[in-house]
Structures are given as C-alpha cells and as structure tokens.
Image (tube, rainbow, N blue to C red):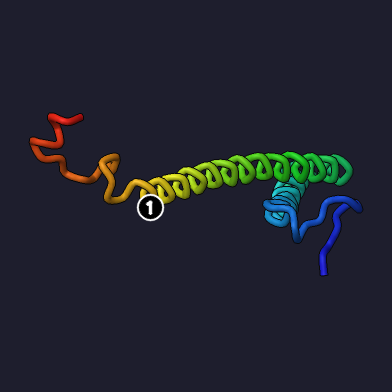
C-alpha cells in the first residue's frame, strides 16, 4: 500500500522521497527544538521548524537525486563496457589481446 504525501507525491514509488521526508522531519525537530531552547519563543520556533523541514527535505532531495543520477550513469557505462567486451572478445579489436610482431605490422 502506497502513501501519498500532499496527494501527489507517492512516497513508496518515487526514489529518494521517503528518505527526504524522514530527514526533513528530523531536521524540523532539531531546528525547532533548538530554537525553542535558545529563545523560549513558541511561535517563532514553530516557524523555524517549518523552515527547517523545507530546507532539509529539499537539500536531501537534491543530494539524493544527484547521487542517483551519477549511479545510473556509471551503471550505463558499465553495461556498455560489458556489451563491448562480449562483442570484441577474441577479435583483432580486443584491447586486452596481446599483439605479436606480425599483427602489429598488418595494422
């Protein structure tokens, strides 16, 4: 069963959404409670907590999505390399094949 945040963000199926919401909640608690302990102003502490939630959630969202994109790029490059290895293995285009003197003079 999926959980939709604000009616449109499917937390279960969207990558990084769950962690962003959880870290945002933790950031909200820390910043709001810290501000309250420092100033004893309830309304301002609630405002700081909401701001902390938004900043922490968005910050971790962008961080996580960037790392996910980097991982997908590395995975795509690895798959391409594996495909090329299978395709060129044993042929004269194989970069790991040691070339003898007669093969070097031909190419």
Q: In which quarter of the image is residue 43?
A: top right
For the N terminus, the quadrant is bottom right
Residue furthest out toward the left: 101
Residue found at x 47% / y 43%: 77
Residue 107 coordinates in the image, percent (x, y): 20, 29
Left or right: where does residue 65 sit relative to residue 74?
right
Residue 53 coordinates in the image, percent (x, y): 76, 45
Residue found at x 88% / y 50%: 8
Between 56 and 100, the residue placed more toward the observer is: 100
Between 80 and 103, the residue placed more toward the observer is: 103
| Residue where numbered disc 1 is placed | 86
Badge 1: how crowded within 10 Å, few (<14), some, or many (20+)? few
Residue 4 coordinates in the image, percent (x, y): 86, 58
Total label count?
1
Left or right: where does residue 6 sit relative to residue 80?
right
Residue 81 coordinates in the image, percent (x, y): 41, 46
> Is residue 41 something one can see in this rendering?
yes
Between 72 and 7, the residue placed more toward the observer is: 72
């Amino acid at each position: 069963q999926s959980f939709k945040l604000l009616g449109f963000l499917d937390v279960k199926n969207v990558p990084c959404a769950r962690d962003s919401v959880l870290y945002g909640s933790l950031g909200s608690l820390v910043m709001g409670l810290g501000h309250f302990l420092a100033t004893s102003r309830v309304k301002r502490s609630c405002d700081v907590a909401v701001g902390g939630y938004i900043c922490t959630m968005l910050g971790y969202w962008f961080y996580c999505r960037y790392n996910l994109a980097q991982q997908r790029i590395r995975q795509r490059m690895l798959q391409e390399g594996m495909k090329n290895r299978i395709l060129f293995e044993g042929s004269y285009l194989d970069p790991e094949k040691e070339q003898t003197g007669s093969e070097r003079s031909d190419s």
